[in-house]
Amino acid sequence: MRVLSASELLSAWERGLAQMPVQRALTLLAAACPETSVDTLAKLSIGQRDAYLLTLREWTFGTQLLSLATCPSCRERVELNFNVADIRIASNFELAEAYSLSIAEYELHFRLPNSQDLAAIDSYTDISKTRYFLLKRCLLTANQNGQAITADQLPTDIVDAVVQRMAEAEPQADVQLKLSCPSCSHQWQETFDIVSFFWNEIDAWAYRVLREVHTLALAYGWHETEILTLSPGRRQFYLEMVSK
Ligand SMILES: [Zn+2]
């Protein structure tokens, strides 16, 4: 993986505009990992994908992350300021090919969900069905009292237990922020989604950069490519000259 230039990031943003979040994540990774096939990237587990996205975000916009949350108790807007290191979960990333779970008379083998699985279940809005279809895709073998069974024959509590085990195997896929309200001291947890967080930042960045290109192109007659290769500092300098 490598750092994206301003021009490459803009191209990825343009492609991602019409895409669903699961595809946007792959568009960004494919741009930053030209040596890896999109198919290989799509088969990364969600935790691995998110760890790469977090690194790409760090290379693109730095280590600090700023966000806003609303206190569920008093509705106060809480400003969050945290570091990439706070949400990077240490992992040796030697993930197993398959995981197993023995529960009651059931013996199950499964793999961890990847982007292809998330894309396939994107259309399901019913959360109970989503969990079931995710499991169905990731289930390798299932036995009840030594007899092979299919995913359809698994009771709901066993489905829930496997989905829970998948989440435990890969905490980077489900990052929880522990928040505390400065106004009423209420404490709660919120999910941090690197895909939507990073995408919103790229979106805001792209609009700003395109406005800058417009201003400089009008003032100096430069081409977009020339303006985008300027360092942010130099671009800023010329923008200040133009506004004087
Ligand atoms: Zn509060």
Image (cartoon, rainbow, N blue to C red):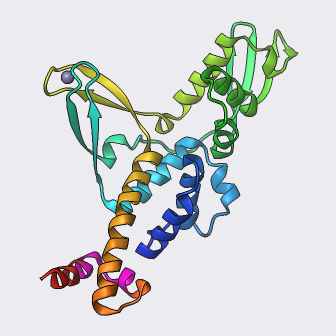
Residue 11 point in image, percent of width and height = 51, 70
Q: Is residue 181 visible?
A: yes
x 72%, y 11%: residue? 155
Quadrant showing the C terminus: bottom left
Residue 9 point in image, percent of width and height = 46, 68
Residue nearer the viewer, 207 or 34:
207
Is 231 a magenta residue? yes
Is 110 a magenta residue? no
Q: Which residue is situated farthest in the right direction here?
A: 147
x 76%, y 14%: residue? 154
Residue 148 point in image, percent of width and height = 87, 18
What secondary structure prevails in the magenta region?
helix
Extent of the magenta region: 227-235
Residue 102 point in image, percent of width and height = 69, 16
x 55%, y 31%: residue? 169
Residue nearer the viewer, 172 or 244:
244
Q: Is residue 29 visible?
A: no
Tell me: residue 221, above or below residue 5.
below
